[in-house]
Amino acid sequence: MADDGVLGKQLWISDGTAAGTHVVKFAPRIESDAQTQELNWDSTSVSPTGVSVTVKKGATTIYTAANASGSFNYDSYGTGIFTTEVYAVGSSGEFLVDRQIVSVIDDSAEPTVSLLGSSGRENPMQLQDFAWDVDASAVGVHVTIQQVTSQGSFVIYDNPAAAHSGSFNFDSYGLGDFTITVAASDADSDWTGDASSTTATRQVTVYPTLPLTLLRDIMQHGSYLGVGDFLYFSAQTDETGGELWRSDGRTATWHHFS
């Protein structure tokens, strides 16, 4: 093992001469896809009688050549493990080998999308609200909210240029299954197809706590009904007139339904 100051500590083979000393195999060199990925070779100094050049991405060969010298740029092949091999037989019979393994990684991570707010099962008395937060570096934030009821499926919010953080209240949309979908991508463009995207979803079912006929009966007859921790009753105020109210006995939780 030796370190030449360029390739790092690698396995070498030698016949005791400078010309017969070369790397046999070495561990992958890690580079970002923002760097230029290019193979350059030149074996003209040994007047080769035969040259074989191969570039592979994984197990797939993406380039071959038999030139004594040349170059091959593989930036457009994106990320992955690339193996470049150059074999040359010199005019004096010497056998020259250059083999490199490069691990090209994405220099930009996928955007992170966080969803908060309503989820699972909720009743109409609770706050129905979705909130989202996306990495500031992301671009193209697209937010869609869909409602599914017995009458069909409806898109109640669709913003292909949404802010990185925001919220949407859907109290007024009543019952049904609500799903928020947030998609975002990064602005990475080191090669075609370099941009990565993230999609996140969150779902809530808003279900009725009382039959509508029973609610109407409470309104019409001035009756009341206890359900769980709440008392439902009809009441009248100067500001709102006659309406349906509910309370769990605490002043802060009195709530009227217009």
Image (spheres, grey):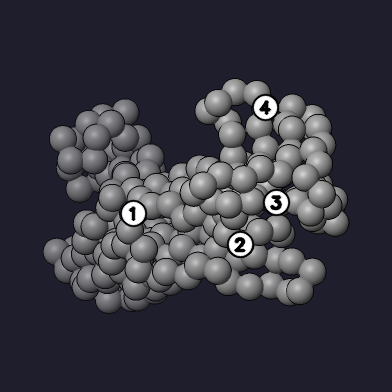
Q: Do callouts 4 and 2 mark residues in contact (Cβ within 8 Å)?
A: no
Q: Position of residue 44 (x, y in %)?
A: 17, 68
Q: Position of residue 221 (x, y in %)?
A: 82, 49
Q: Residue at x 51, y 47 (%)?
A: 238
Q: Position of residue 79 (x, y in %)?
A: 39, 58
Q: Quickly name the residue at label 4.
A: 248
N-terminal label among 4 and 1: 1
Q: Do callouts 3 and 2 mark residues in contact (Cβ within 8 Å)?
A: no
Q: Secondary structure at mark 4?
A: loop
Q: CA distance from mark 3 to mark 4?
A: 20 Å
Q: Disc 3 marks which amino acid?
A: Val
Left or right: 8 as drawn, with respect to 149: left
N-terminal label among 3 and 1: 1
Q: Do callouts 3 and 4 mark residues in contact (Cβ within 8 Å)?
A: no
N-terminal label among 3 and 2: 2
The one nearer the camera, 245 or 91, is: 245
Q: Is residue 102 visible to us here? A: no
Q: Secondary structure at mark 3?
A: strand
Left or right: 194 as drawn, with respect to 256: left
Q: Residue at x 50, y 43 (%)?
A: 116
* Circle 4 residues within 10 Å: few <14, some 14–19, many ≥20: some
Q: CA distance from mark 4 to mark 1?
A: 37 Å
Q: CA distance from mark 3 to mark 1?
A: 26 Å
N-terminal label among 3 and 4: 3
Q: Relative to 47, say whether 125 is above or below.
A: above
Q: Secondary structure at mark 1?
A: loop
Q: Quickly name the residue at label 2.
A: 173
Q: Quickly name the residue at label 1.
A: 164
Q: Relative to 103, say whether 162 is above or below.
A: below
Q: Residue at x 14, y 64 (%)?
A: 45
Q: Quickly name the residue at label 3.
A: 206
Q: Nearer the viewer, mark 3 or mark 1?
A: 3
